[in-house]
Amino acid sequence: MIPADAKRKLTEIAGNAFLDRPEDMRLYEYDGGVDKALPEIVLFPETAAQIAAILRVALDHRIPLLGRGAGTGLSGGAIPCRGGIVVSFARMNRILEIDLDNERAVVEPGVVNLDLTLAVQGRKYFFAPDPSSQRACTIGGNVAENAGGPHTLAYGVTTNHVLGLEAVLPDGAIVHTGGMGQDHPGLDLTGLLTGSEGTMALITKVTVRLMRQPEAVKTILAIYDTVDDCANTVSEITARAITPAAVEMLDGVMLRMVEEATHAGYPMDAAAVLLIELEGLQEAVEEQVEQVRDACAACHAREFRIARHAQERELLWKGRKNAFGAIGRVSPFYYVQDGVVPRTQIAPTLRAIGGIGSRCGLTISNIFHAGDGNMHPIILFDARKPGDLKKAQRAGEDILDHCISVGGSITGEHGIGMEKVELMRHLYSEESLEMMRRLKSLFDPDGMLNPGKLLPTGKGCTEIRQLPLVNEKTML
């Protein structure tokens, strides 16, 4: 419970921009995952100085606190599992500087990802990280989770495009890391804070790299009668020393849901498809198209389509980007997972996922960034059936354990959050986890920032999760 004196100070600092009514708190108890927990107050600061003052009050009264962007995350990173304060960045949404001569921009954390690209695309630039939620997700959230997207294969994840940060530490100190330059001496604090899921500092300003639009773009749809042939094509393309901008895979269950919703041109009778995008100089792209055609043919693709114009290309990507919405027409509840496997393990992992679904009695569809082995199995369930959510979560854990067993990881872009926090023990030794805890404690010795996330505490779930976190519903 936040003391009355602390609450008065907090609301004054926020300029009375706050929410504390129970019905308003319900809007901040969830993100895009399946866990839930209520905050006690939501504050809407507009400056780093306000955030610093809020953090000092929180520290004085030992009040848990976390930052929140758009709430589109899928691992519970923005859920206040210990109650306390949510700091919303909704009002810190300005693009502060665009410097195209040096291919840089400076933004506040509440800037929507796509809005930055829209601000510069008229001059043939773009911001490369492109999560599927890019129309809603914020750059601050992308930094916190080290978000990826379909074009990660060529351009990398968020950390590859963050050059500097302004951050507020738990004691209210405002620090700056990196900057407009390419490399800065000293420890890489920018890289350390990117992906730390708000457990070390609150990011209040981000310096990012902008990219020039490629001269030529070709989008290809390769169609297969077997999932294995489709999955094996990914390794075949890599073996031919080709690095597409994107290689996305949809299995038959998923592509049928997508096609019924978007009419993007995906074949309803296929077992799987690859959506491949090539970018670069015109001559190089034309040559790569033929190399990719050969690779697909070698893996028994039954059809190889090249988008004939920009509208057709945009329609194919619309199908991919709107896939999660398409699922809602078939199942009102679903659970999205996020694991990584080596490219050569994609086909065996898809078979393993199918087996897990059969054992659990659940339908699992697959849509994922095949180029870098970032799997996104989508587990359909019915929260109205007692125990069905727990079955979906158990299936998710089994899938991630399989990813680890074949040399992969438990996340490629969604983060650990509270969803996978105990699975960190399956991935890292206790010595490695203790090293991470000690590093976090240098920034946040009182464990005040986003507690219960990223690192296991060694306590049981009932001790960690003091508020009811999971019920038989999901807001997806």
Image: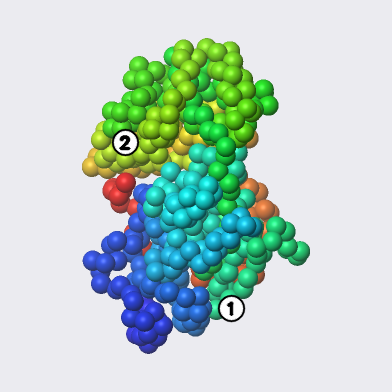
Circle number at residue 12: none
Q: What residue is shown at x 58% (from left), y 46% (from top)? A: 212
Please give the name of the residue rendered at 41% of the width and 47% of the height, measured from the top-left corner: 133
Expressed as whole percent of the image width and height from the top left, the position of residue 229 reads: 52, 17
N-terminal of the pair, mark 2 or mark 1, is 1
Q: Residues within 10 Å of mark 1 (few under 14, many from 20)?
A: some
Horizontal arrangement in the rendering, residue 467 relative to residue 404 (left or right):
left
- Residue, disc 1: 173
Q: Position of residue 275 (x, y in %)?
A: 47, 28
Q: State how far apart marks 2 and 1 are (Cα).
A: 44 Å
The residue closer to the viewer here, 356 or 379, is 379
Say which residue appears at 50% left-offset and 43% top-offset.
149
The picture quadrant where one finds residue 115 is bottom left
Residue underneath mark 2: 327
- Residue kind at label 1, given as amino acid type: Ala
In this rendering, is residue 256 above or below 69?
A: above
Q: Is residue 13 visible?
A: yes
Residue 75 at x, y = what percent? Answer: 45, 50
Q: Does residue 94 appear to the left or right of 382 in the view shown?
A: right
Q: Residue at x 38, y 33 (%)?
A: 311
Which amino acid type is marked by label 2?
Ile
